[in-house]
Amino acid sequence: MSEKKPKKIKIVIAGPFAAGKTEFIRTVSEIEPVTTERKITDPKEKEKKSSTTVAMDFGKIKIDDEHELYLFGTPGQSRFNFMWEILGEGALGVIVLVDSTDPKTFHEARRIINFFQSRYPVPLVVAANKQDLPNAWSPEDVAVALDISEEEGIPVIGISAKNKDDVKKALLLLLELIKTQLTG
Amino acid sequence: MTLTGDLKSFSFADILQVLHADKKSGVLIVEWKDMTVAYYIKDGELVLARPVDKVFRIYVDRDFEKLLEKLRLRESSLAETVKKFFLSRLDNREGIFSFTQGFIRYPETVPVFYPAEYLIMESARRLTLEETERKISDELLVFEKAPDYEEKVRKARLTDEEQKVLNLIDGKNTVKDILEKSGLDKLTLYRTLYGLLSIGAIRRKRKKAPKKPSISLDLLAKLIEKIKKL
Ligand SMILES: Nc1nc2c(ncn2[C@@H]2O[C@H](COP(=O)(O)OP(=O)(O)O)[C@@H](O)[C@H]2O)c(=O)[nH]1
Ligand SMILES: [Mg+2]
C-alpha cells in the first residue's frame, strides 16, 4: 500500500447559535474535536454558554484506509460568510441542528436551510435537538414552525446531541437519504 | 406537552400556525406586563379569550361548558372575547407564551367566528419588514399554491391586495416578479406571503432537483456500516 493521504468525505453540521453543533460532533468523533473556541463576553450570549466556536470545529471518523469522514460545524455568529461557502462546497450532506427549547432561533434555522437549498442543494436532515429537556418542542411542531412541508423532502428527527445513539441515528438518516437519491 | 416562548421573537402568527397545523387542543397562556390572558384552543381554533388575575386559576376549570356558565358567557358572545382580548392586543409583543395541551374538556362543537386562518393573517399584517424576512428570506424564492388553498384563503378573508398576490403565485413567479407585477409595496407583499405561508395556503417550491450525491454506493454502504458500529 502506498502512503496516500486518506480522502475526505464531508458532512456539514449547521444550525443557529447554541443549537448543539459542537456537542453533536464531540459525541461521535473519534478524535477530540478540533475547536477554535473563544470565551464569550456578551452577557446575553453568556447566559447560554461560556465559549463559542469562532472559525469552525470538526470531528473525524475513519471509514477505511483510504477514507475519512469529517464532520464540520459551522461557526456560530457570523452567518453565511465566506466560511459557509467553503463548508458547503463539496459536502455530501447537511444536518441542521435546532435547539427545540428555543423557538426564537427557529426562524434562523429556516434561513440556514434556505441557504443550503439555494447554494448547495445536497441532501439535508433537520435534527430537533435537546429532546432530553422538559420544555423541548416535539420534532413535529418544530417541523411546522420551520415551514417544512412534506413534499420538501426534509426529514425531521428528534435527538439529544449528548446521546451517542441519537447522533448516530441522525447521521444514518442522512446517509439513507443520500442512498435514496443515489439509487432513485 | 408544552410550547413556550417569547412573543417578541415568535409572533401569534407563528404560534397559531403550529397549533392549527396539528389541530391541537388546550390552553395558550400569555403573560403580558399589564395582564395575563388564557386563550382556549380547540382543534387548532381559538374559541375563547379570558383575562385572569393569577395563572393558577386557569387550571381550576377543566370543563369548558362549566367554565362558560361560571363566566356567564353565552356561545354568541365568545367572538366578542376574541376581539377584545386577542385582536386588540396584536400590536403588543411584550409577552411570554406557553401552551399546555389537553387538560380542558371541550364539548363536541364550539362555534368559531374567527377562524385561525383569519387570526394568522391579521397577525401577519402587523409584522415588521425585518420579521417577515425571517420566512421570506430571499427575493428569488418561488411559491406555489397548496392543493387545498381555496378553503384556507376563504377563511382568511383576504383583502384585494392580498388576493392580487395570491393570483400571482403560480410556482413560477419569484418574490421579485410578484413585487414588480403586483405594483405593491414590499412590506405588504412580504406580510401577505408570510401569512399565506403560515396558514398553509402556499408553500415553497423546490427549486431544482438536487444533484446526485458524489459518492459510490459501495463507499456509502461502508460509511453506513461504520456509523452503525460506532
Ligand atoms: N440538555 C442538552 N444540552 C445540550 C444538548 N446539545 C447541546 N447542549 C448544550 O447546549 C449548549 C450549546 O451547545 P454547543 O454544542 O456549544 O452549541 P453550538 O453553538 O451549536 O456549537 C452547551 O451548553 C451544550 O452542552 C442536548 O441535546 N441536551
Ligand atoms: Mg460550537
Image: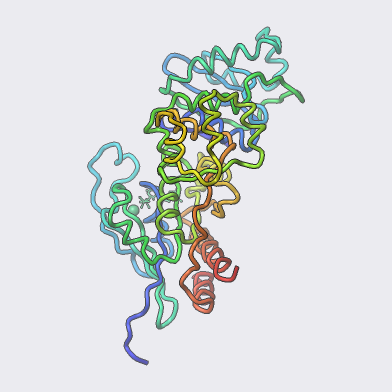
Q: Is residue B79 above or below residue B130?
A: above
Q: Position of residue A142 (x, y in %)?
A: 53, 43
Residue sitting at x 53%, y 79%: B218
Image quadrant in which the N terminus of chain B is located: top right
- Apparent side of residue B40 relative to residue B136 in the rendered image (left or right): right
Query: Which corner quadrant of the image does residue A30 belong to?
Result: bottom left
- Apparent side of residue B186 relative to residue A54 in the rendered image (left or right): right
User: Outermost residue toward the bottom?
Assistant: A1
Q: Is residue B8 above or below residue A162?
A: above
Q: Is residue B84 above or below residue B12?
A: above
Count of marks, rendered view: 0
Residue sitting at x 72%, y 15%: B66
- Apparent side of residue B199 relative to residue A33 in the rendered image (left or right): right
Q: Position of residue A52 (x, y in %)?
A: 29, 50
The colour scheme of the drawn protein is: rainbow
Query: Which corner quadrant of the image does residue B138 belong to?
Result: top left
Is residue B2 at all visible to an observer of this figure?
A: no
Is residue B222 at all visible to an observer of this figure?
A: yes
Q: Position of residue B78 (x, y in %)?
A: 65, 14
Q: Position of residue B124 (x, y in %)?
A: 48, 28
User: Outermost residue toward the right?
Assistant: B108
